[in-house]
Image (cartoon, helix red, strand yellow):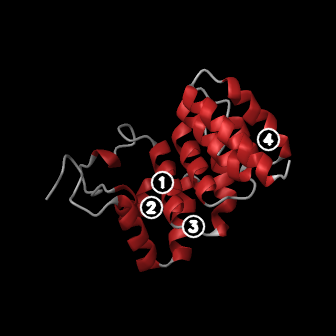
Amino acid sequence: MTHGIGMVARPPVAESITALADRIGVPAFVSVCVDLLTGAPRERHVEELRHLTGHAWLPGDPVLDHEAWKDFWVRTWGARGLLHVWHDSATAAVVAGLGDEHYRPAEMCLKTATRHEVAGAGDGAARLAAHDLPRVRAQALRCLAVSGDSEHVGAVTACLDDPSDVVRRQAARALEAVERRLDR
């Protein structure tokens, strides 16, 4: 049964991701995700991408077209896999992914760094707290709430006057969390 072009009836992506990690083992899974996040060509990991995306990845699927589905999606899917199945060996790739040229992989790295309290994510999150998109700024503040240090407080307080009410509320929460964590 298919749902749209290239989509097949499958379990939710989070379940499919954890099932893949169970099947191939966490070290191999993390290695694939890091490879994707750091720019591996999609053709190298088609079988794994079926589980990471919910797409069938069959000949003719738009997801195989580099113009229809730009490479930033592949990096995003690698980061999304790490959101659901984590190992500290992925830390450097996720921290580097915070500097991705496209917001989608960077935002997914923020989510991953937040969920897993990734060491070293503070500087990248502080830079992203000034991103053009409010959703990225808000996610950066969530990340700073768990990974920010004293040098990141300025980035958080700068968002207290953000034009977006969502960002302002998240900044207030992040500031409380950072101050509590730093015992200030």
Discs 1, 3 touching: Cβ within 8 Å: no
**Label 2 neighbour load within 10 Å: few <14, some 14-19, many 20+:** few
Q: In the image, which is nearer the foreground, mark 1 or mark 3?
A: 3
Residue position for label 3: 86
Secondary-structure class at tag 1: loop
Of 174 and 155, the residue lying toward us = 174
Point 20% across, 47% down: residue: 5
Label 3, label 2: how far apart the Cα atoms are: 21 Å
Q: At which x and y percent is residue 119?
A: 74, 58
Q: Earlier in the sequence, mark 4 or mark 3?
A: 3
Q: CA distance from mark 4 to mark 3?
A: 25 Å
Q: Sort mark 1 into few (<14), some (14-19) or many (20+) by Cα contacts within 10 Å.
A: some
Residue 127: x percent and y percent?
71, 36
Residue 9 found in image quarter: bottom left
| Alpha-carbon span between mark 1 and mark 3 | 22 Å
In the rendered structure, the answer to whether residue 62 lies left or right of residue 176 reads left
Tell me what residue is drawn at x 55 percent, y 68 percent: 30
Cβ atoms at labels 3 and 2 below 8 Å apart: no
Of callouts 2 and 4, the N-terminal one = 2
Q: Amino acid at mark 2?
A: Arg
Left or right: residue 115 compared with residue 11 = right
- Say above or below: 103 vs 133: below
Label 4 crowd (10 A; few <14 / some 14-19 / many >=20): many
Asked whether the viewer can see residue 102, the reply is: no
Q: Position of residue 173 (x, y in %)?
A: 66, 41
Q: Which mark is residue 44?
A: 2
> What amino acid is at disc 1?
Pro
For mark 4, what is the residue? Answer: 152
Q: Which residue is mark 1?
A: 41
Q: CA distance from mark 2 to mark 4?
A: 38 Å
